[in-house]
Image (cartoon, rainbow, N blue to C red):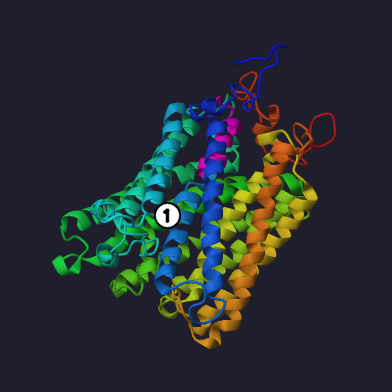
Amino acid sequence: MAESATGEKLNYLNHERGLWSWLTTIDHKRIGLMYLFAMTIFFFVAGILALCMRLELFHPGPDIMTAETYNVFFTLHGTIMIFLFIVPGIPATMGNFLIPLMIGAKDVAFPRLNLLSYYLYLIGAVLALVALVKPVGPEFFSNFLTWLGLTGPVDTGWTFYAPYSLESGTAVVWMTFAAFILGFSSILTGLNFIVTIHKLRAPGMTWFRLPVFIWASYATAIIQTLATPVVGISLLLIILERVMGIGIFNPKLGGDPVLFEHFFWFYSHPVVYIMVLPAFGIVGEIIPVFSRKPLFGYKMVCYASLAIAFVGFFIWAHHMFVAGISDKSAIYFSIATFGVAIPTAIKVFNWVSTMYKGSIRLETPMLYAMSFVFIFLIAGTTGVYLATLATDVFYHDTYFVVAHFHYTIQGGAVIGLIAALHFWYPKITGKMYNDKVARSAWFLVFVGFNLTFLPQFVLGMQGMPRRYFDYLPMFEPMHQLSTIGAFINGAGYSLALLNLFYCAFFGKERAPSNPFESHSLEWQTQSPPIHENFEETPVVTDWPYSYGVPVEGGGHH
């Protein structure tokens, strides 16, 4: 381990400075930060595309773009946000940074594989950017790009549904191949985390002394490892269909487009839990700290994470109730979908019970955590309507689904990540953020988010179709409210991230070693952590949620 001239061990930010040392690092903390930097860029790009769409929808009829451009923006927003930000989101950033620290390890089990996962992510991102190239310039150059399949930005939507994705005159092959490569990054990350949690726990760190974020990350890694190969094969089959015309999904060649939906959603419903389960873990870490109470029902919270991951593999076809599946299949998937509400409700009940009669401190991470609970209650409640056969038939292709999806994903994964960045910010940087700015940003995010998507539930109930470029004048007031909310929401996220970025590089307020008085293991080392995390391998003797529990000699934890 590197040491300074005075013999002090260097933290991971100062150990081997320089760009090359970062690009070749195998330190899990640096890799997590490199993921975070890249994904923040994609988050802003996808957000700008969303704001452009909302501007277009401010009035009926074309305003700032054509219908074709709207389809491209819609596809790119979804593809970038899902594959380049949300799916890798918390696992690749906070998971990479925190898992070894929380279990008392020096690094992940396979540090070089971890770095390879990051570069696969970058390769997938570059391929996605290449897919945006449109044939222009001299005829020979334009023809060459067309021969390569670079025929313009994809307009299929982020789901790449057949048969349109087989016939679209856009760069579907490049975009699906980009998602295919990104899938490998996700699989390798999941495998790494599973082995790390199994094999590298500190002495005394039994399964039921693990923080709930580790349980959530473990369940997420199982989904990443088992479900991602299915979507990889599905996307590869789309590529083979377009290149070789083999007729698996193309009905003109005897194929079945509904088969693609089965393959796609077998991955893409469990992937919702890749996005949200780690956020559950983050909220489970934050609420006990700022309530100063033990986490209520700890073991049930842990089991619920595994139950959500397990049940998630058996409910994919609730996305397909109007796709022509059999009545018996629809009834089964409807009932099974209701079943996933049980472990989810257990978590919400435990969070609220932890806060009950607690000594709650409304600091910024807690504000985001409480917002998460409120928003996710709305997400879960509205999901009941989509799991019910009779109501889903009406709501399925309306803005009701758009609102429910964003309450689940943005209200879950994105707000969960922002909460995590504020909670562990002193650990990551060794500094404190500007709390007044952070609270102002939270307020804008909370108000802007709800103002954006609550009107979309109303639009859906009124019958406004999703994915449409134009609409009837009767829908205009709700669209305008939604657009105003989107810009407030965007301002909130921008302010929050700029505050964190500015204070990391230019802030002068040094953070105490444990500013929030957490009992979790990652706070028992210096901030920022030294290169290999701990001076000596820690020995764990208690679980991390013993807040308010009497200790020998009087007093409380």
Identify the image quadrant of the N terminus.
top right
- Whether 47 is among the magenta residues is no
Residue position marked by numbered label 1 in the rendering: 270
Residue 514 location, quadrant:
top right
Q: Please give the name of the residue rendered at 58% of the width and 54% of the height, measured from the top-left corner.
A: 414
The answer to whether residue 222 is left or right of residue 485 is left
Identify the image quadrant of the C terminus.
top right
> Which segment did they paint magenta?
91-106
Residue 203 in view in this figure? yes
Q: Is residue 146 above or below residue 189?
A: below
Q: Amino acid at mark 1?
A: Pro
The image shows residue 10 at horizontal and vertical percentages of: 66, 20
Q: Please give the name of the residue rendered at 16% of the width and 55% of the height, measured from the top-left corner.
A: 244
- Whether 102 is among the magenta residues is yes
| Identity of the residue furthest to the right in this view | 554
Residue 362 in view in this figure? no
Q: Please give the name of the residue rendered at 42% of the width and 74% of the height, measured from the top-left corner.
A: 67
The answer to whether residue 344 is left or right of residue 137 is right
Q: Please give the name of the residue rendered at 64% of the width and 56% of the height, measured from the top-left corner.
A: 493
Q: Is residue 494 above or below residue 383?
A: above
Element at badge 1?
helix
The image shows residue 263 at horizontal and vertical percentages of: 30, 58
Viewer-closest of 468 and 361: 468
Classify 10 Å Cα crowding around label 1: few (below 14), some (14-19), many (20 and above). many
Residue 211 location, quadrant:
top right
The image shows residue 488 at horizontal and vertical percentages of: 67, 65
The answer to whether residue 469 is left or right of residue 98 is left
Question: Taken as a whole, is the magenta stretch helix, strand or loop?
Answer: helix
